[in-house]
Each structure stands twice: as structure tokens, then as C-alpha cells.
Amino acid sequence: MQLWGGALADTLDWLRANGKQVILIGPVPVYDKSVPLAQALEVASQRKLLHSTADQQRIKHAPFYEVVAAAQPGPSFRFLDPVQWMCSSECITMKGGVTLYRDSHHLSVAGVEALLEQVAVGLEL
């Protein structure tokens, strides 16, 4: 496990041992290139440049998911997974003709707004 993985595991353990309720929000799908730029090139070239699935994203973030699995979600620990929300057969990068990303791994305002309902449900708001 990478150094940060051990630190995350230690932090989760400490929080839970000290009676804190932990809600961890995982990473969004990430890409090797700027999503808005790739989307523009897709339109210009009429070729699909962005493709990813939930399985591919979980492989990219495997060390993170290993820490989460070891944390054993329960009453004091909840994990919210944007990959689950954004990827079914293929991960989405656009909704309603608007990009969900501002670069290769950060959501745009529209991307955050697209996840508000799932986050609210996950947080039980």
C-alpha cells in the first residue's frame, strides 16, 4: 500500500476509535487527457476519444478502494462512490450537452451540480 493509503487508513481508524461518524466521498472518474479538450476533438474528428468504465476506474484507484474495503463500512463509516454514480456501461463526461469536467480529473460546476442529488441522498439530507 502506498504511504498515503496507510495514512488514510490510520486517519479513518482514529476517527472511528474516537467516536466520529465518517463519510468519505471517493474519487470521480479520471482521464489521461483534458476532458473538455477531448470532447471538442471528438466533435471535430467524429471519433470517440474518451472511454472508461466503472471497472477501469476502480483499477486506476485500486489502492484507494483497498483502504475503503478494509475500513468495513458500517454505522460509523459511510462511503459515497462517484464512480458508481457516473459509470454504468460507460462513464459519462457530459450531461445535457454540457461538460462535467474542467480538466482531466476535476469536475466543473455543472459536474458538481449533476451529483448533488446522489450526494444529498448519501449524506441523508
Image (cartoon, rainbow, N blue to C red):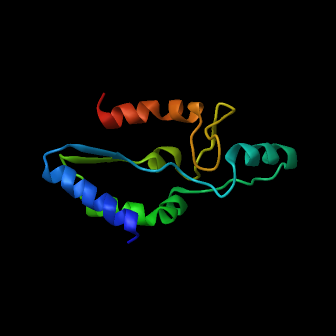
Confirm whether residue 15 shows in the render: yes
In the rendered image, residue 5, in percent from the top left (x then y), is placed at 36, 64
Confirm whether residue 66 shows in the render: no
Give the left or right position of residue 15, taking residue 32 as reference.
left
In the rendered image, residue 97, in percent from the top left (x then y), is placed at 69, 32
View extreme (top): residue:
125
Report which quarter residue 69 is drawn in: bottom left
Q: Locate the C terminus by quadrant.
A: top left
Give the left or right position of residue 6, taking residue 104 as reference.
left
Report which quarter residue 44 is drawn in: top right
Q: In this rendering, is residue 29 above or below 55?
A: above
Looking at the rendered structure, the number of numbered marks drawn on it comes to 0
Q: Residue at x 62, y 41 (%)?
A: 101
Q: In this rendering, is residue 77 above or below 70?
A: above
Q: Locate the N terminus by quadrant.
A: bottom left
In the rendered image, residue 30, in percent from the top left (x then y), is placed at 57, 53
Q: In this rendering, is residue 79 above or below 120?
A: below
Q: Residue at x 81, y 53 (%)?
A: 47
Q: Of 46 and 89, which appears nearest the observer?
A: 46
Q: Of 8 and 59, which appears nearest the observer?
A: 8
In the rendered image, residue 111, in percent from the top left (x then y), is placed at 56, 36
Q: Residue at x 69, y 49 (%)?
A: 34
Q: Of 66 and 106, which appears nearest the observer?
A: 106
Q: Residue at x 62, y 55 (%)?
A: 31
View extreme (right): residue:
44
Give the left or right position of residue 59, taking residue 18 as reference.
right
